[in-house]
Amino acid sequence: MAANKKLLVLPGDGIGPEVMREVRRVIDWMERRRSVTFDISEDLVGGAAIDQRGTPITAETVAKAREADAVLFGSVGGPRWDKLGFDMRPEIAILTLRRELGLFANLRPAIVLDPLVDASTLKADVIRGLDLMIVRESTGGLYFGEPRGIETLPDGQQRGVNTEVYTTNEIERVARVAFELARKRQNRLCSVEKANVMESGLLWRQVVTALHGREFGDVELSHMYADNCAMQLVRNPRQFDVIVTTNLFGDLLSDLSSMLTGSLGMLPSATLGLPDSSGRRHALYEPIHGSAPDIAGKGIANPMGQMLSFAMLLRYSFDMEDEAALIERACTNVLASGIRTADVMAPGTAKVGTSVMGESVLRELEKLSA
Ligand code: IPM
Ligand code: MG
């Protein structure tokens, strides 16, 4: 591991900068108390970059991301930039980073923390103890497939086209990440597609099955159609351990899963590339919540999704399991003590804003490492 851990911080838009501020305090604390040092730089992405530089992400920012050991991403987008046309969407920033850095494996955990079991709209009995990991393919499929576009037909009608396309290699490398993760968890993998309707789904199923036979016979593998998976996730989510699925289905199913936990503001994610010969891999970490323009600037956003994304960064990119677990413990303890941001409020708990929540986590970190 590089002695000096190069971190690129991209707060983005909306609540991104507010929640990232609290993470910076956690990073400062780590540097002071755990004698680690990070080589941090910060840059603009999304609407913020459009405003200042006329583009959602510059080539320089992409280059910096490529050089970094890890990227900590906030969130992009908001109504201010909605009218700028398809090529000027703030979302292009994250899509470009995924594509340019080859970040093909998007890990999206959905964990129900005990103190938050009542925050879900589902019955506590159904979701208590839920610990699910969705591995979403993130550089292929419908998001990037060609041909794509809007064309005008001879009769004056228009036609919008996107293409779902997957190659053997693309399926295999993301399935491999999922199988390996399953081995470290409950050893169960469910592969999700629509092999009953789509050829790309049929190939997906064949490739995952073959890889299982060749390398992962010890992992329990099942297959499920995506629509059934959506239903099963609501009916009995604890039947799943790791789910691996395509880009679009993963986008939908991970939003669904995040709400099983009742707290979109809490969930982190990691997006990983292929390791090179030295074991180094590109990686980006971001909370699942978006820029939440409706609450941006009010100081009420939950900073824990961003903090837990930083914890994932420490775990996956820097092998700092102890520090990652410390942040996770601190967050759980603060919630258990009844300190809550508005999104995870419950009767009998105290409502605080973003920066008080940040301070509470810092105080807990201090306590845990005393
Ligand atoms: C996500 C988001 C993105 C996606 C958007 C912002 C492009 O919804 O990370 O899930 O669709 O992948
Ligand atoms: Mg999404």
Image: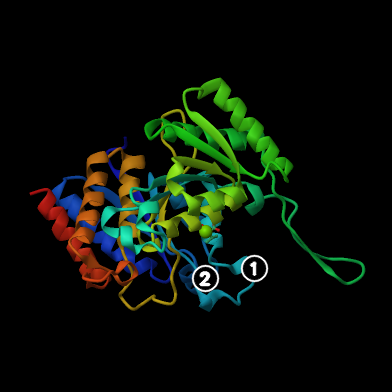
Q: Which residue lies furthest to the right in this view?
A: 155
Check disc 2 and report the residue beneath it.
Answer: 50
How far is disc 1 from disc 2 in space, using C-alphas?
13 Å
Q: Quadrant of residue 331?
A: bottom left
The numbered mark, 1 or 2, whose residue comes first in the sequence reads 2
**How many residues crowd mark 2 within 10 Å: few (<14), some (14–19), many (20+)?**
some
**How many residues crowd mark 1 within 10 Å: few (<14), some (14–19), many (20+)?**
few
As drawn, 339 above or below 6: below
Check disc 1 and report the residue beneath it.
Answer: 86
* Relative image position of residue 128 (x, y in whole percent): 34, 51
Query: Which image quadrant: the N terminus?
Result: top left
Which residue is at a point 21% across and 47% down the rendered structure image? Answer: 326
Camera-nearest residue between 217 and 130: 130
Q: How is the image coloured?
A: rainbow
As drawn, 24 above or below 203: below
Closer to the eye: label 1 or 2:
1
As drawn, 354 above or below 69: below
Q: Could you tell me the amino acid type at mark 2?
A: Ile
The answer, for residue 250, to whether it is visible in the render is: no
Q: Is residue 170 left or right of residue 364?
A: right
Check disc 2 and report its element: helix, strand or loop.
helix
Q: Does the residue labelled 2 lie within 8 Å of ligand 1?
A: no
Q: Does the residue labelled 1 lie within 8 Å of ligand 1?
A: no
Q: Could you tell me the amino acid type at mark 1?
A: Phe
Which residue is at a point 37% across and 63% down the rendered structure image? Answer: 265
The answer, for residue 1, to whether it is visible in the render is: yes
* Relative image position of residue 31 (x, y in whole percent): 19, 50
Q: Is residue 7 left or right of residue 36?
A: right
Q: Quadrant of residue 350?
A: bottom left
* Relative image position of residue 267 (x, y in whole percent): 38, 56
Q: Which residue lies furthest to the left in this view?
A: 370
